[in-house]
Amino acid sequence: MIPARYNSSRFPGKPLATLKGKTLIQNVYDQASSASRIDSVIVATDDARIFDSVKKFGGSVLMTSPDHSCGTDRIAEVARDLECDIVVNVQGDEPFIRPEMIDDTVQLLLEDEAASISTLAVRIDNEDEIVNPNVVKVVTDDRGYALYFSRSPIPYFREEWKDLQSITLQQGKTVLFKHIGVYGYRKESLLNFTAMEKKWLEEMEKLEQLRALAAGMKIKVKETAFNTFGIDTIEDLRKAEEWQSISL
């Protein structure tokens, strides 16, 4: 499921911006439609312009309440009335999402009954991402369950890093992982999660997955070889035109 809203504060009308001849929302939709472990792809939106655009390219789309504060609440509204076991939340500004990544989130839940939520992470390969608060980091336990997500560098190498200016990749030591914002939910877990009150950790970091961890929900994380490039600003859109890690 792809949540999409028109009135982004940093990039109004973002889902309908054009990348390589297609709107962003169509790029995401086409990538998701190529996943083999899903039965259907649905855009969830509260905007008639996005609704009409998805209909025009032949996609499935449903209107939602305009009162949702985040995409997860939006997809939960739609999922509540669907007959389904697993719901995958694919961000509408991730045109480089790979179908294999969506399949992996589904497979994690099929293989692990203890997991309520699944997601992905990729190895960080440059210092800029370590200190960039827009790059969310994740650490897991030995079984692959998330211990914590943060905008700060985690784990922090106390001996080598005296301050943020001295941070460098520590070759041969524990690697750092960037969280990829695609989530698989069991339907019941999704509905329970969106009914929970926000806690202080979520409010501090502005990361909703911390609400799930605080409630004791298990989030299974798999390392992926694929990176993504989210579109948050007009400048990101310009960079995406040249981004060749994944071809659309």
Image (spheres, grey):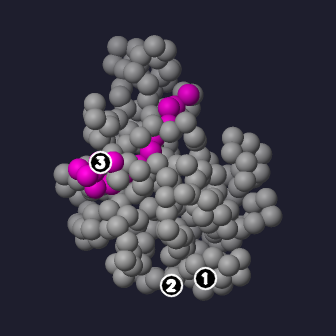
| Residue 23 pos. (x, y %) | 71, 68
Q: How far apart are marks 2 and 3 (CA)?
A: 33 Å
Magenta span covers which residues? 111-125
Q: Which mark is residue 63?
A: 2
- Residue identified by numbered label 1: 51
Q: Residue at x 34, y 53 (%)?
A: 109
Vertical order, 136 against 117 (above or below): above
- At numbered mark 2, what does the secondary structure look like: helix, strand or loop? strand
Front position in the image: 162 or 67: 67
| Residue 98 pos. (x, y %) | 59, 50
Q: Does the magenta stretch include residue 64?
A: no
Q: Is residue 116 magenta?
A: yes
| Residue 55 pos. (x, y %) | 66, 82
First in sequence, mark 2 or 3: give its number.
2
**Quick one: label 2, few (<14), some, or many (20+) residues within 10 Å?**
some
Q: Distance between the residues labelled 1 and 2?
A: 7 Å
Q: Which residue is drawn at 55% across and 49% down?
A: 100
Q: Residue 112 carries which label?
A: 3
Front position in the image: 41 or 245: 41
Q: Which residue is drawn at 44% across and 29% down?
A: 176
- At numbered mark 3, what does the secondary structure look like: helix, strand or loop? loop
Vertical order, 96 against 56 (above or below): above
Amino acid marked by disc 3: Asp
